Amino acid sequence: MNQPAKDQHLPLQTLVIPSDLAMVSKVEGQILQQIEQHHYSDEAIFAIKLTLEEALTNAIKHGNKCCGDKQVIVRFHVDEEQFVVYIRDEGPGFNPDAVPDPTSPDRLSLPSGRGILLMRAYMDEVAYLDDGRELYIRKWNRP
Amino acid sequence: MTAPTPNPASPGSSSGVLTLTREQQGDVVVVRVRGMAVAEMAGQLSRALQEAAQLQPKVMAVDLSELGFISSTGLGSIVAAHVSCQKYGTRLFLINPRPMIAEVLRVTRLNNLFKVCATVAEAEQLVAGGAK
């Protein structure tokens, strides 16, 4: 699994979940509990919850196709300065640059396709690794 | 010792609680969406909004004043309801979203698709006044 050199020193906690949307709130709950303990702002908590929701839903639905025997691996670090998470699925990967812009006028009335936009808008760093199979996210805890 | 009551509308809450209620008064249908519109609840939200749209009122007001969280899936449910309303000639309005929800609408530029009003009465006045 990938871990950028700048993050090699960060201790990561690992959660492994089945491809079941009911698990999303459980992962969020476990991570957000630690976020709240480190006194992140309400806006940052909202942003992290939104990003986890989008990333985990994408991994389960689009990556693993809700396949019962595929898992999602979540590795994360939280401290008073930053939140870092890696979310890996067992799908074939994808090219995030090929995802159309959901804010273009001809796509505004479509019901889906806004998850990546939201993650990029609310997080400080978002990158796809290993041909789109793993998502890396960082959010700094700024006052 | 009594545990504090969790606030389902708190952004930090991991609860997937979503409460939906519907009222109809004449040509106006109000759907109140309370709590957390997470992906797991998207089917419930979609059904409620589509059922309201199928009543084909003149005005459909989706009250977001007690909505604490919405994901892209929840947004998709509202967009789909908007498309249905257009088909029926119904005007859909979003009522009084909290600042963090309004920001999600701005980031996704859905504030260009939906008309946002402070109150249901304001939405009714806009329709009565013939506003586009």
Image (cartoon, coloured by chain):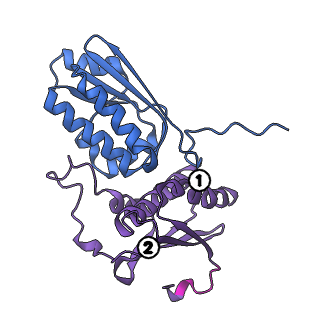
Q: Nearer the viewer, residue B17 or B93?
A: B17
B45 lies left or right of A99: right
Colour assignment, chain A? purple
Evaluate whether label 2 is on the same chain as label 1. yes
Task: Name the mark on residue A89.
Answer: 2
Q: Quadrant of residue B77?
A: top left
Q: Which subunit holds the residue at mark 2?
A: A
Q: Earlier in the sequence, mark 2 or mark 1?
A: 1
Measuring 53% from the left and 44% from the top, which residue is drawn there? Answer: B16
Q: Is residue B88 covered in magenta?
A: no
Tell me where the magenta segment starts and ends, as one range.
A6-11
Q: Which chain is blue?
A: B
Taking the view exactly as shown, the residue that stands out farthest to the front is: A69
Chain under callout 1: A
Most frequent secondary structure within the magenta stretch = loop
The amino acid at mark 1 is Ser
Depicted B110 relative to depicted A72: above or below: above
Q: Is residue A72 visible?
A: yes
Q: Position of residue B47 (x, y in %)?
A: 34, 35
Asked whether residue A143 appears in the rendered view, the answer is: no
Check the image and report above or below for B77 versus A2: above
Label 2 crowd bin: few (<14), some (14–19), many (20+), radius 10 Å: many
